[in-house]
Image: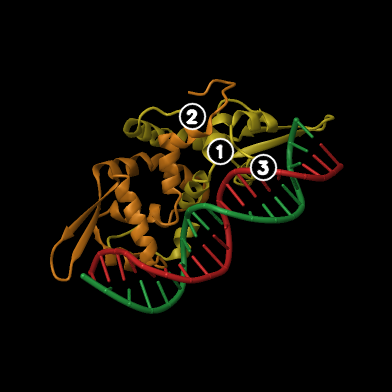
Chain colours: A orange, B yellow, C green, D red
Amino acid sequence: MLDAHTRVPVAEYDACPVTGIVRRMGERWTLLVLALLARRPYRFNELHRAIEGISQRMLTRTLRGLEGDGLVERTVFPTVPPSVEYALSAEGADLMASLAPLTAWAVRRGGSSASM
Amino acid sequence: MLDAHTRVPVAEYDACPVTGIVRRMGERWTLLVLALLARRPYRFNELHRAIEGISQRMLTRTLRGLEGDGLVERTVFPTVPPSVEYALSAEGADLMASLAPLTAWAVRRGGSSASM
DNA sequence: CAGTATCCGACCGGATACTG
DNA sequence: CAGTATCCGGTCGGATACTG
């Protein structure tokens, strides 16, 4: 913890797990993807249709990032054509739950929330 | 709120207050600055010294952004040389409080937190 | 002390085209 | 259907120099 006169080393700050998750959530589409997956699993193109304005590239990158963090699980069904399902992991669900006070704070001060 | 088959318009998502605050927090130094100011008010160069690796430019930009959001208050004492104090606003303090569950979640999964 | 001004590289994110 | 590959502009953020 920080005492009143700590000098914070950059490396330590960057390694902080809070910093990591907050910077991930700050990426362009992450929060919206998580908000959708919090309701039910989605297929890739289903997400693509649900999120107006996202490119295939960014949807892929966002999902891969979340998968790498263990927040989203990717399941491939080897059908023809292939079908891939994305769902929140248990950790992802916990994360979304722990976000509730923050969203409440934001809604309280900023008006109604369109997407969560 | 999102029903099971909503198509989310970009403009609405970008206008979402949750999105806004999360993207602000995701900026490079924001969280660390807030964590320091949560303990006590700081002068400009005091913050500069406390945060290893931040440039004057980025410290200024970060503080101006937080000030614009109403999360930090800037007080100028017209001494010679000038002295400027930065402190969390009431809203900023509330925000930090509402972040507690998220930091707890992050620490639980990611190990100890170095800066909060 | 508390900033601005300027320059610059890196990377974030969009557009488009292509594929197993 | 579920992606890659490629290109490209804009912004984020660092370095350095200067100032009331």
**Residue denoted by label 2:** B115
> Which residue is depicted at the point 30% across and 60% down?
B3
> Looking at the picture, which amino acid does disc 1 mark?
Glu
Label 1 to label 3, Cα distance in Å?
A: 20 Å
Q: What secondary structure is found at the residue carrying circle 1? A: helix
Relative to A96, residue B79 above or below: above
Label 2 to label 1, Cα distance in Å?
A: 21 Å
Residue nearer the viewer, A70 or B64: A70
* Mark 2 neighbour class, 10 Å CA radius: few under 14, some 14 to 19, many 20 or more: many
Q: What secondary structure is found at the residue carrying circle 2? A: loop
Name the chain letter of the residue that bears numbered label 1.
Answer: B
* Horizontal side of residue D13 vs A42, given as left or right: right
Mark earlier in primary sequence (2, 3)? 3
Name the chain letter of the residue that bears numbered label 2.
Answer: B
**Residue denoted by label 1:** B91
> Which residue is depicted at the point 30% across and 46% down?
A71
* Mark 1 neighbour class, 10 Å CA radius: few under 14, some 14 to 19, many 20 or more: some
Residue nearer the viewer, B4 or C8: C8
Which disc, if any, is residue A106? Answer: none
Residue nearer the viewer, A89 or A58: A58
**Residue denoted by label 3:** B60
